Image: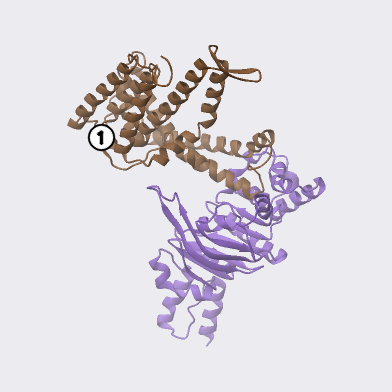
């Protein structure tokens, strides 16, 4: 599914003293099957933007086109059906768990889609496996007796079980330990590769985003600053720093190296690429 | 829907009403609420309306904002009106099948509806114009004069301020959880009452859990900062009774006495006394 955002603006509490312009005239197109990263400072409008993509928030002005159709023209029932195709994993998704067992909780989404029992069972099993948990060991446990990282995975599985064609994740790794973070990101990446679904990943971490996505959307105060490939975005160090962001550590390293070795490339943002580049320069 | 709940919210505009001492406002609101139940003719309600309208204008809070607060109570008001309209015995003025509308019923229903509306508007003006901290400081002071309660005045005030403080937080949380479940295909907008009630479970359970978690965290945080209740505790901001508070207190006494005097008016307005 392609998603097109046109002149999208959103104002919270319009007309009250708490009025806040969260989005200002956002225009972007997300192609089918792409992997997009959204990055920006706290309060830059990232979360507001993604909540428009499945119609949880209604824009103050502008529109969102999914496969060419304006989702806000649709009837309520159509909007609910749309949410089956556009999966949104909120920040701290473990706070949404409510069922007695993990299996039942993951089945909540597919059940709402009105699938058959066998289909639900199969999807639950598959999505729990997809997030790296042992289905048989965990299915009858209460979600509340799991560890924080496991709860997070169960919650993500709950959205995956709906088999969305667009998957949006709002800081899926916030508050996890480094290993948990690596694992969840790797699973998201492999999901994207296997199923060719569109993934939109909101994150604070340039490192995470840099090595995974095809295009980065940089937001600041409700406006789009950049929407480009990581290579190009990470060369705009001054602009990024002026809006409170930074480039990956390794890019800073490459920049320092360039002062000594002018022939080295600085548009590098993964350790792996840095290693190759340094070796290349050393070996001349 | 949730944004319509204005009770307990604070709406800063910096008006005269906002600057008044919370104690004056609490005392006046209490007297006002008691007075509402003494009123026995429409003159009194007319006077109440004038008083509330003046205060609202002075407070600079948009009228629409206050009206939104009543919206949430429409159901209760309707229910009261309907019950009183048909259940009060007296002179019949109209029949509707097995139901009869009496003149007395009409009167009681009107009074009850007005009473409820003024009650909500009056009390919400107090909370809208008083920050939660001022409000509880004022409450604490007032409770000192109630025997038995005075010993726990500080604890009760603290509980109240925490409760008030968490109303918007829990609302936000509810909305967040609701959105998260909607994103998983939950449907809260259509269906009959039973399926709608069932649909609340995915919201209520996470909400309860988060409320307990927050309470736990808050208790730990307070203990970590050595909180130990009322005894010997001093405050950063002392309540100070200023000239404008004295003036307003006099005005308020005049208003309350005025309201009381309306009960003695013998000339009927709309309804026979």
Q: Indicate how the structure is coloured in the image.
A: by chain
The percent coordinates of residue A61 (x first, y second) are 50, 59
Let me know if residue A147 appears in the view: no
Q: Residue at x 34, y 33 (%)?
A: B53
Hey, which residue is sitting farthest bottom in the picture? A284
Q: Is residue B29 left or right of residue A32?
A: left
Q: Quadrant of residue A262?
A: bottom left
Identify the secondary structure beneath mark 1: loop
Q: Is residue A260 left or right of residue B261?
A: right
The percent coordinates of residue A150 (x first, y second) are 63, 47
Residue B70, above or below B265: below
The one nearer the camera, A113 or A167, is A113
Let me know if residue A15 appears in the view: yes
Q: Is residue A281 left or right of residue B121?
A: right
Hey, which residue is sitting farthest top in the picture? B90
The one nearer the camera, A149 or B259, is B259
Q: Residue at x 48, y 68 (%)?
A: A248
The percent coordinates of residue A147 (x first, y second) are 60, 44
Q: Colour of chain A?
A: purple
Residue A274, above or below A182: below
Q: Chain of mark 1?
A: B
Q: Colour of chain B?
A: brown
Hey, which residue is sitting farthest right in the picture? A118
The percent coordinates of residue B92 (x first, y second) are 56, 15
User: Which residue is under mark 1?
Assistant: B237
Q: Residue at x 31, y 23 (%)?
A: B27
Q: Residue at x 52, y 42 (%)?
A: B173
The one nearer the camera, A166 or A19, is A19
Residue A90, above or below B270: below
Q: Is residue B75 left or right of residue B41?
A: right
**Neighbours of disc 1 within 10 Å: few (<14), some (14-19), many (20+):** few
In the rendered view of the protein, which quadrant contains the C terminus of chain B?
A: top left
């Amino acid at each position: 599914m392609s998603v097109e955002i046109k002149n999208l603006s959103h104002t919270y509490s319009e007309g009250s003293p708490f009025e806040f312009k969260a989005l200002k005239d956002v225009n972007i197109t997300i192609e089918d099957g792409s992997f997009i990263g959204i990055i920006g400072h706290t309060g830059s409008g990232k979360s507001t933007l993604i909540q428009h993509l499945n119609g949880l928030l209604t824009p103050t002005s502008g529109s969102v086109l999914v496969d060419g159709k304006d989702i806000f023209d649709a009837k309520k029932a159509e909007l609910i059906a749309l949410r089956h195709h556009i999966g949104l994993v909120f920040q701290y998704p473990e706070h949404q768990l409510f069922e007695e067992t993990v299996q039942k909780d993951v089945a909540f989404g597919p059940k709402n889609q009105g699938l058959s029992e066998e289909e639900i069972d199969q999807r639950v099993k598959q999505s729990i496996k997809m997030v790296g948990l042992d289905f048989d060991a965990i299915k009858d446990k209460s979600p509340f007796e799991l560890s924080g990282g496991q709860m997070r995975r169960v919650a993500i599985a709950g959205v995956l079980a709906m088999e969305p064609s667009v998957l949006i994740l709002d800081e899926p790794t916030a508050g996890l330990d480094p290993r948990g973070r690596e694992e969840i990101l790797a699973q998201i990446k492999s999901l994207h590769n296997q199923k060719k679904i569109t993934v939109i990943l909101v994150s604070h971490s340039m490192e995470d985003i840099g090595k995974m996505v095809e295009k980065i959307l940089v937001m600041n105060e409700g406006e789009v600053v950049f929407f480009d490939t990581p290579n190009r975005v990470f060369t705009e160090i001054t602009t990024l720093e002026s809006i409170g962001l930074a480039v990956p550590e390794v890019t800073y390293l490459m920049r320092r190296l360039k002062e000594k070795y002018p022939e080295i490339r600085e548009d590098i943002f993964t350790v792996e690429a840095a290693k190759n580049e340094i070796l290349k320069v050393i070996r001349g | 829907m949730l944004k319509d709940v204005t009770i307990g919210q604070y709406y800063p505009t910096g008006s005269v009403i906002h600057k008044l001492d919370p104690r004056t406002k609490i005392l006046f609101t209490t007297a006002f609420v008691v007075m509402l139940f003494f009123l026995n003719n429409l003159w009194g309600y007319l006077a109440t309306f004038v008083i509330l309208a003046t205060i609202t204008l002075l407070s600079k809070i948009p009228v629409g904002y206050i009206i939104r607060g009543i919206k949430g109570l429409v159901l209760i008001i309707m229910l009261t009106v309907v019950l009183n309209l048909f259940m009060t015995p007296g002179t019949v003025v109209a029949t509707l099948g097995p139901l009869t509308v009496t003149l007395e019923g009409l009167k009681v229903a009107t009074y009850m509806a007005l009473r409820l509306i003024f009650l909500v508007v009056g009390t919400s003006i107090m909370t809208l114009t008083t920050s939660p901290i001022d409000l509880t400081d004022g409450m604490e002071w007032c409770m000192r004069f109630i025997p038995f309660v005075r010993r726990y005045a500080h604890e009760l005030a603290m509980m109240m301020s925490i409760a008030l403080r968490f109303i918007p937080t829990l609302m936000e949380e509810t909305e967040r959880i609701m959105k998260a479940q909607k994103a998983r295909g939950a449907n809260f907008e259509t269906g009959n009452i039973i399926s709608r009630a069932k649909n609340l479970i995915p919201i209520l359970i996470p909400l309860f859990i988060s409320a307990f978690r927050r309470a736990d965290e808050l208790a730990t945080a307070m203990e970590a900062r050595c909180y130990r209740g009322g005894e010997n505790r001093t405050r950063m901001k002392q309540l100070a009774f200023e000239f404008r508070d004295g003036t307003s207190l006099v005005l308020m006494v005049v208003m309350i006495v005025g309201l009381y005097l309306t009960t003695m008016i013998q000339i009927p307005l709309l309804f026979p006394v």
